[in-house]
Image (cartoon, rainbow, N blue to C red):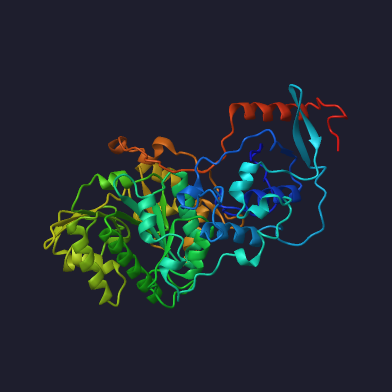
């Protein structure tokens, strides 16, 4: 499907995060567009060849001579799409038959020309039908026959904590890591619960805008997990979540905060043991540029972390100034051993995990400090680098969050990211980020505020010291492929319609 004038909405309401080629999407979308009565629709199904670039059924091992390339009904992806079609819009609600003839025109070929003819309902090519339907019986049904899609048997089943991860989760953690890791086997990890769901989505939208695709999300609760699945995020569930996680009282210093932070180091250690490097980024860290290549270039046996020191001058590695909300850990023996020590120390502590990072890696009162910006853990010989605060500022550094134009102020410094910390309370944190303009998600429409386009060279940062870094954008976007002939066809039809270059016989019922 293609449309013009992207400034105007395609339909009234929210467009769910359908998985293309997994059923229900085409029928739901066309129904909602026609029902919204906001656009004229040209049905060129008989003239346009719509292709899915990847055989998704083959990827899932479902392709055979019997199912003709269709996905199995048991696929979680198929069920997720049907669930979305049921809970969004009006597709699955009983309603009288709607006359679409004043909004819908069919493109027909007459001799060497193309004309428009009024149509009562749209059609689907056999190829698209084969991809989007789950059973042969559906192929011959009218496009408005939604009984099969809207059947309760196809709703997304809730994933209860009493069932096994292997049986219920769409993808295991190992599968997700294999799918998303970059060429250096590095992944970006975000951890969030229900109280930070909108901030999680803003973080995801920003990463996608920058072309960062090697990220995974750890959901702390069932609500966030199911929401993330339906938003198409690469998400896994922590099956040992913290208890009593409150919605508005889980900020820095609270008991809830202390319990949640200890989950992060444990998950990072698990991923490191699986052979992947991890950039742990709290979802309140706003990214201006992709720092992964720069952090990886610091070399093995190096642990790079943000400094929480707020004074603009003096050492950045002072006691308890290692911020455990943004750090890069390599999957090597020294780092894994050190992380095991951190997790063990945090388990026995009544504080959050953050003091454990410093006390283990830099020693009590900074006994293992090297100079003003490093530490050396003696038993593993792991070097801890406190990152340059001009490039990785915390929430108090230079009072950047108080500037009228935070983005420009950070641009002058050459920031890769800025951390939205040093503010007390979830609501104040959200307000500060939204007011600053560093917000990329619209909760009302559940859509990103920016396109997912390639951010180009800006992903490496504007600083001359790091201009050699390149964005590694391996994102695969499923989309319809339209041939040049098809584009010319549509352009010709639209031009004729706009110029009224048709007769009364052309617009016939």
106 left or right, relative to 241: right
Q: Nearer the viewer, residue 72 or 304?
A: 72
Q: Nearer the viewer, residue 278 or 283?
A: 278
Counting from the top left corner in percent of width and height, residue 80 is at: 56, 59
Q: Residue furthest right?
A: 504
Counting from the top left corner in percent of width and height, residue 273 is at: 26, 60
Q: Nearer the viewer, residue 348 or 506?
A: 506
Counting from the top left corner in percent of width and height, residue 359 is at: 20, 67
Q: Quadrant of the C terminus?
A: top right
**255 lies above or below 10:** below
Q: Nearer the viewer, residue 368 or 175?
A: 175
Counting from the top left corner in percent of width and height, residue 79 is at: 57, 60
How many numbered badges does the structure rendering display? Answer: 0
Q: Residue furthest top?
A: 112
The answer to whether any part of residue 506 appears in the image is: yes
98 left or right, relative to 365: right
327 left or right, relative to 110: left
The answer to whether any part of residue 420 appears in the image is: no
Q: Quadrant of residue 190?
A: bottom left
Q: Quadrant of residue 318?
A: bottom left
């Amino acid at each position: 499907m293609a449309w013009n004038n992207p400034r105007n909405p395609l339909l009234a309401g929210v467009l769910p995060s359908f998985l293309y080629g997994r059923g229900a999407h085409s029928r739901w979308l066309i129904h909602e567009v026609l029902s919204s009565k906001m656009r004229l629709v040209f049905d060129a199904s008989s003239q346009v060849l719509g292709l899915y670039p990847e055989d998704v059924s083959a990827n899932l091992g479902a392709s055979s001579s019997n199912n003709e390339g269709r996905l199995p009904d048991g696929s979680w992806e198929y069920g997720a799409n049907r669930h979305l079609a049921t809970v969004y819009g009006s597709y699955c609600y009983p309603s009288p038959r709607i006359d679409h003839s004043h909004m819908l025109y069919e493109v027909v070929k007459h001799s060497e020309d193309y004309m428009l003819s009024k149509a009562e309902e749209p059609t689907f090519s056999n190829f698209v039908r084969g991809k989007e339907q789950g059973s042969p019986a559906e192929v011959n049904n009218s496009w408005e026959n939604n009984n099969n899609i809207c059947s309760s048997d196809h709703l997304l089943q809730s994933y209860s904590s009493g069932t096994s991860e292997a049986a219920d989760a769409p993808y295991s953690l190992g599968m997700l890591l294999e799918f998303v890791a970059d060429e250096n086997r590095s992944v970006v990890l975000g951890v969030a619960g229900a109280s930070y769901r909108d901030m999680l989505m803003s973080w995801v939208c920003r990463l996608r805008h920058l072309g960062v695709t090697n990220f995974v999300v750890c959901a702390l609760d069932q609500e966030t997990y199911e929401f993330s699945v339906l938003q198409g995020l690469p998400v896994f569930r922590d099956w040992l979540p913290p208890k009593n996680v409150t919605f508005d009282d889980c900020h820095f210093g609270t008991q809830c905060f202390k319990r949640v932070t200890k989950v992060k180091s444990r998950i990072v250690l698990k991923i490191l043991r699986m052979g992947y490097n991890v950039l742990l980024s709290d979802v309140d860290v706003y990214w201006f540029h992709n720092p992964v290549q720069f952090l990886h270039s610091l070399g093995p046996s190096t642990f790079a972390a943000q400094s929480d020191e707020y004074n603009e001058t003096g050492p950045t590695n002072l006691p308890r100034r290692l911020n455990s909300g943004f750090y890069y850990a390599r999957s090597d023996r020294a780092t894994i051993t050190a992380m095991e020590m951190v997790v063990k120390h945090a388990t026995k502590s009544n504080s959050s995990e953050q003091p454990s990072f410093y006390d283990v890696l830099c020693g009590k009162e900074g006994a293992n400090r090297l100079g003003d910006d490093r530490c050396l853990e003696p038993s593993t010989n792991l070097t801890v680098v406190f990152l340059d605060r001009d490039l990785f500022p915390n929430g108090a550094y230079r009072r950047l969050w108080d500037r009228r134009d935070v983005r420009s102020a950070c641009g002058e410094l050459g920031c890769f990211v800025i951390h939205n910390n040093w503010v007390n309370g979830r609501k104040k944190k959200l307000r500060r980020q939204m007011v600053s303009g560093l917000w990329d998600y619209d909760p009302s429409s559940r859509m990103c505020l920016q396109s997912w386009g390639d951010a180009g060279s800006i992903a490496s940062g504007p600083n001359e010291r790091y201009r050699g870094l390149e964005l590694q954008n391996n994102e695969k976007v499923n989309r319809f492929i339209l041939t040049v002939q098809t584009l010319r066809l549509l352009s010709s039809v639209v031009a004729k319609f706009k110029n009224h270059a048709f007769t009364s016989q052309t617009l016939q019922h």
